[in-house]
Image (cartoon, coloured by chain):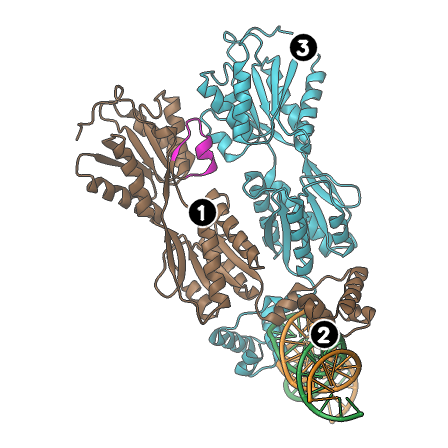
Chain colours: A cyan, B brown, C green, D orange
Amino acid sequence: MVDVAAHAGVSLGTVSNVLNRPDRVAPATRARVLKAIEELGFVRNEAARQLRAGRSRTIGLVVLDVGNPFFTDIAAGVEQAAEDAGLSVVLCNSNQDRARELRHLSSFQEQRVFGVLITPVGPASRRIQRLREGGTSVVLVDRASGRHHCSVSVDDQVGGAVAIEHLLALGHRRIAFVGGPTSLRQVSERLDGARAALEDAGGGARLTVLETAAMTVACGREAGAQLARTAARTRSTAVFCANDLLALGVLQEMTRKELRVPQDMAIVGYDDIDFAAAAAVPLTSVRQPRAQLGRSAAELLIDEVRNPNSHDHRQLVFEPELVMRESTGRPDRESRPSATAQ
Amino acid sequence: MVDVAAHAGVSLGTVSNVLNRPDRVAPATRARVLKAIEELGFVRNEAARQLRAGRSRTIGLVVLDVGNPFFTDIAAGVEQAAEDAGLSVVLCNSNQDRARELRHLSSFQEQRVFGVLITPVGPASRRIQRLREGGTSVVLVDRASGRHHCSVSVDDQVGGAVAIEHLLALGHRRIAFVGGPTSLRQVSERLDGARAALEDAGGGARLTVLETAAMTVACGREAGAQLARTAARTRSTAVFCANDLLALGVLQEMTRKELRVPQDMAIVGYDDIDFAAAAAVPLTSVRQPRAQLGRSAAELLIDEVRNPNSHDHRQLVFEPELVMRESTGRPDRESRPSATAQ
DNA sequence: CCCCTTTCGTGAAACCTTTCAGTGGGTTGG
DNA sequence: CCAACCCACTGAAAGGTTTCACGAAAGGGG
């Protein structure tokens, strides 16, 4: 900048003004400075700006799995809101690993990030508490938080409930739940919601729970195989999977075993990933407002940082939405023992 | 740091030494300083370090699509190499958009990143040239470069060739190529490789090209529908898709039209994404050494930056590898008109 | 006991920007 | 014609770290 100033015949402060408040500089001078910048190929040093500002213009975002479209869509929402506010985003992957999560948080703190958005591996940790005490704002994503912080999440119980209600409305009375491990909050809450919906409907239906080791296509196939092994008379006529990967696995196994979807087995997934609509039989799925989730989280964070006085913490809970496709088309009455069993 | 120094009763320089060259400080003093750091909750300011160092410890990585596992796997390789070298990575998405790419590059330059790894949207642009002139090292990923820079890529012609050779070896003589737009370098080179392999094998086989508008599952289904419409007598007996998404689309359409894979139609994909192995019929696919690609790119970059004198530019080209699965199991001779057609 | 090394520490400069009080013209109003 | 004011610009301080030339003390050898 000194060089630019000399080249343009102005002082350092004027160059800075051209860069940051161009309206305070006379047009002629401004043009001269811009020309000097161009000629010298000057590029602002972000580190110095940041040092001076005391805080960076970057939002730190930590997700559980960058390979999962759920999180990349959230990230897209965050980026959009950040861009609107003149901020950038750095996306980090904890890979469900506590140690990696901690490393990322430490790095964020050293970078004096604008703020942190995180889907924590476990319940909000002490490290996050420390981060807040250090003056960094944190918003929890896909996790509800206490009254004293901001968070955005989707109501997984409602999600489980709408899936089951849909299946019940279609006349299914023997339903399987595929998902696991149940130690995952998402899984257990979706299951809770499913059970609650069943109860609300009166006792006429049965829910069989197949716990899987993980939420992958392979585990879905295993669960599908297990379903297919059951004699048709007692077999569930519909399955609700805790995510779409499981549902795809179940679907593939049904195809292999020559069971028709939805006539012999209706399938509902969860997340509505792109592959769900593109599957051999397009999947009915429970969609979460992913981009919206990310956008809202970023907006809460920005408000918290920019308006520390007027800001009050909010816990946003979004409702998921059922997307109906062919995998639950009205089940074929003939091929299904009538709805009396059990 | 001033506070820490005061608290520990030492000078500023000593605190810095404790942080950066702990061996140069007497153990007792070191312990005192560490205690002070702990008590005061001191956290290094990365911006200041960076300002002082003149360069950040972050590698900038720009990919075409973060949603594509090909790139996330590359990113994982980069991260691994970076971590080993004490660097971090910021992953940016150009979304195949030139303007976004430029924004990311400008931001990298302002941040004085350690170096840049990029899969450019078009051919290496003037902007990248400018970046290099500005002293930032750049390594091209999944693109070959000229002699004067480093790059890592995978030989797409070889990839196309091995796919076709495999199909020819299985006895197929009417083969379709699905992919597009052909303006994509990857597509055209894979097609070139396929044609070359066909020629090498002598003229006994035919290649039908179906150009798609994009590389998506939906486009694959369209192409699959088109294939299925052809009368069985003249229909191709095998299809080579320019990526796995297309292959999955074709596979799904085959299932819908009740054509058997591989008996009625063998399918080879490209990229070997996770979904390829998990498909209803596991896909034969051409695998690229993705993590390796990322790791090598990062290593070249690090060498270029750390050893500017001894470094010489290298253009690494990796060979893809055919992963055989059920979608090309030996074709059923009965259901296939014998291998005489044109 | 003195000189020479080595070991520990010190303190100030440098990195680059932003900000803000201040300067020196020119203009306006009385 | 002077005071008040505005505008465009200036110059220096501040922000937190690393580095490096130096000093002081301690240890070793003759």
Same chain for mark 3 and mark 2? The answer is no
How far apart are labels 1 and 2 at the CA level? 44 Å
Expressed as whole percent of the image width and height from the top left, the position of residue B100 reads 49, 55
Q: Is residue A79 above or below residue D15?
A: above
Q: Give residue B157's position: percent from left, percent from top.
A: 30, 47
Rendered view: A211 above or below B292? above
Can you identify the residue that label 3 sits on?
Answer: A204
In the picture, the disc for residue B290 is: 1
Separation (CA) of disc 1 from disc 3: 52 Å
Q: Residue at x 70, y 63 (%)?
A: B44
- Extent of the magenta region: B272-284
Q: Nearer the viewer, residue A15 or B318?
A: B318
Q: Of residues B230 and C20, which is closer to you in this image? A: B230
Residue B288 image-quadrant placement = top left
Instruction: Pinpoint the chain carrying mark 2.
Output: B
The disc at residue B13 is: 2
Residue B228 in the magenta stretch? The answer is no
* SS category of the residue bearing label 3: loop
As drawn, A190 above or below C17:
above
User: How far apart are labels 3 and 2 at the CA level?
Assistant: 76 Å
Which amino acid type corresponds to the residue marked 3 in the rendered image? Gly
* Same chain shared by disc 1 and disc 2: yes
Determine crowd level at label 1: few under 14, some 14-19, many 20+ residues with C-alpha closer than 10 A. many
Q: Position of residue B9 (x, y in %)?
A: 82, 72
Task: For residue B82, say whether it is visible.
Answer: yes
Helix, strand or loop under label 2 = helix
Image quarter of the C terminus of chain B? top left
Label 1, secondary structure: give it.
helix
| Mark nearer the N terminus (1 vs 2) | 2
Q: Chain of mark 3?
A: A
